[in-house]
Amino acid sequence: MAIAYAISYRTIGRQAAQRRLGRSALLILLAFFVALGLGSLGKYGSISFNFLFAAFVALWLLSWNWRKRKAGALLLDVGRFSQSKLMLWVGVLEALFAVFNTSSAINKISTGLGNDTKLLEVISQPVLFWSLAIYFLSMGLSRLEFRENGICYMLSVVKWEKLTSYWWSQDKPNIVTIEFKQPPYLLSTGLRSLRIPSAHRDAVKQILAEHLMMTDVK
């Protein structure tokens, strides 16, 4: 988390980095309690979670082109966002864990398992690791796009009508913070800071001015 905070501080500024750090800490805490809950359900709970998560990632990725088309015509492709490199590295690490876990699972299966439930339990573990690897690699390779009906960010579409205002950082002129009408998901602050390359700053300013209200720095 310290490395992630340092990267965020350098790329998007102190306030945005602090918001991201707080959100990450809450998500880790939530994941801990979810893991405890699944542990209380025994092996059936973990098996179900692993396959459900894999199904979610598959559907989420398969539906991306359709969701992006719904966002309308492309206005500006800004490129990869500031978290891309970090997510790519996380994805690579997850892929290495997945390879190791898959090798271990194959070894266990080849030596024989007692029953079908044990087989599902062994298979579900590499399924989870590969799903996480694909998830983070996909996020790391995604691009920030401004489109006719909204913003494509981290393989999600944020429609213009769900946003209220924006402002540019005084300390880091290439950082724009966009405010949501309501937090988009659990534990979200309702603010999103984006690092815009200097070459695209004027174009982004024009697009945002056409769709949102600019406010003073908060």
Image (cartoon, rainbow, N blue to C red):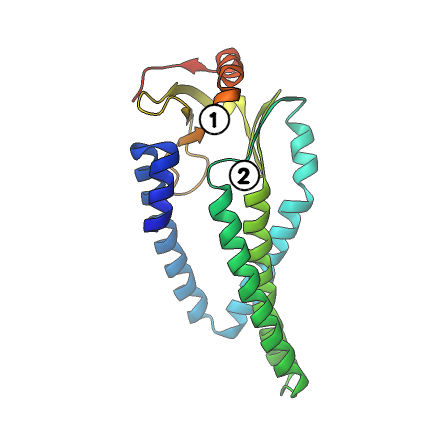
- The percent coordinates of residue 70 (x first, y second) are 67, 28
- The percent coordinates of residue 165 (x first, y second) are 42, 19
The Cα–Cα distance between marks 1 and 2, rounded to whole angstroms, is 15 Å
- The percent coordinates of residue 145 (x first, y second) are 58, 28
Give me the residue at 42% from left, 24% from top: 174
Above or below residue 210? Residue 31 is below
Quadrant placement of the C terminus: top left
Mark 1: give few (<14), some (14-19) or many (20+) Cα within 10 Å.
Answer: many
Asked where in the image residue 67 lies, by quadrant, the reply is top right
- The percent coordinates of residue 77 (x first, y second) are 60, 26
Above or below residue 29? Residue 79 is above
> Residue 5 vs residue 110: left or right?
left
The amino acid pointed to by label 2 is Met
| Mark 2 lies on residue | 154
Secondary structure, mark 2, is loop
Mark 2: give few (<14), some (14-19) or many (20+) Cα within 10 Å.
Answer: some
Above or below residue 129? Residue 12 is above
Asked where in the image residue 102 lies, by quadrant, the reply is bottom right
> Residue 7 vs residue 78: left or right?
left
Badge 1 or badge 2: first in the primary sequence: 2
| Mark 1 lies on residue | 196
